[in-house]
Amino acid sequence: MKKLICSLLLLSGLVYAENIEIHGTSTLHDWKMVSNKTDVAFENDGSKITKLNVSVQIKTLKSGDEGLDEKAYDTLKIDRNNVITFKMVDADLAAGTIKGVFKVLDKERTETLKPEVLTLDHVSGSFKVKMTEFGLEIPSVMFGAIKSGDEVTVKYDIKK
């Protein structure tokens, strides 16, 4: 019986993120990178979300095109920093918002997210961000003939 109770307590604390996706555009075609390996700390006290921290190792973002992946890793300066993070500051279930700090490289930006799903054990939605706001150079190839758009959409689906 003790083993069963311990196992249930351990399982109740498990968190998994189905995935984090980054969607963008270019002069050639739209693109998407997906990570299924996301580190998440997601806690609640039964009435409110008390912690939601998400980090994505940049190298886990994959598009299915090695050239695109390498260009993205160069743009994100993977040699300087290999993680993108979001740390919750406040969650308001009644208002349907989560406020937190989104960090890429050494640049931080406070975001107020309005997830499509916001419960004590599930947060899902998306937000837009411009690469240049984080000091990132817009990726291009073929001497600028093919260029990415500045704005990307970050989609997330996190369950406890």
Image: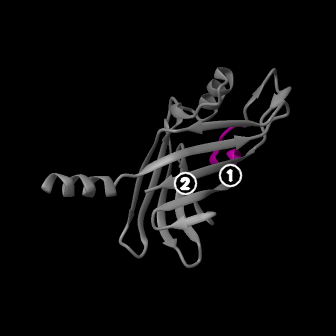
Query: Quick one: label 1, few (<14), some, or many (20+) residues within 10 Å?
Result: some
Give the position of the C terminus as an image quadrant: bottom left
At numbered mark 1, what does the secondary structure look like: helix, strand or loop? strand
Q: Do residues under tags 2 and 1 come within 8 Å of each other at their CB atoms?
A: yes
59 shown above or below 7: above
- Left or right: residue 54 compared with residue 112: left
- Does residue 136 belong to the magenta stretch? yes
- Residue at the extreme bottom: 94
On the image, the x and y values in percent for residue 146 come to 83, 28
Would you name the residue on which mark 2 appears? 102
On the image, the x and y values in percent for residue 81 come to 49, 36
**Residue type indicated by callout 1:** Val
Q: CA distance from mark 2 to mark 1?
A: 10 Å
Q: Range of the magenta residues?
A: 129-137
Q: Report the residue at 75% width, 44% height from top.
A: 150
51 shown above or below 47: above
137 shown above or below 65: below
**Residue type indicated by callout 2:** Phe
Q: Report the residue at 65% width, 43% height from top.
A: 22
Sequence order check, earlier mark of 2 and 1 = 2
- Does residue 4 belong to the magenta stretch? no
| Badge number at residue 129 | 1
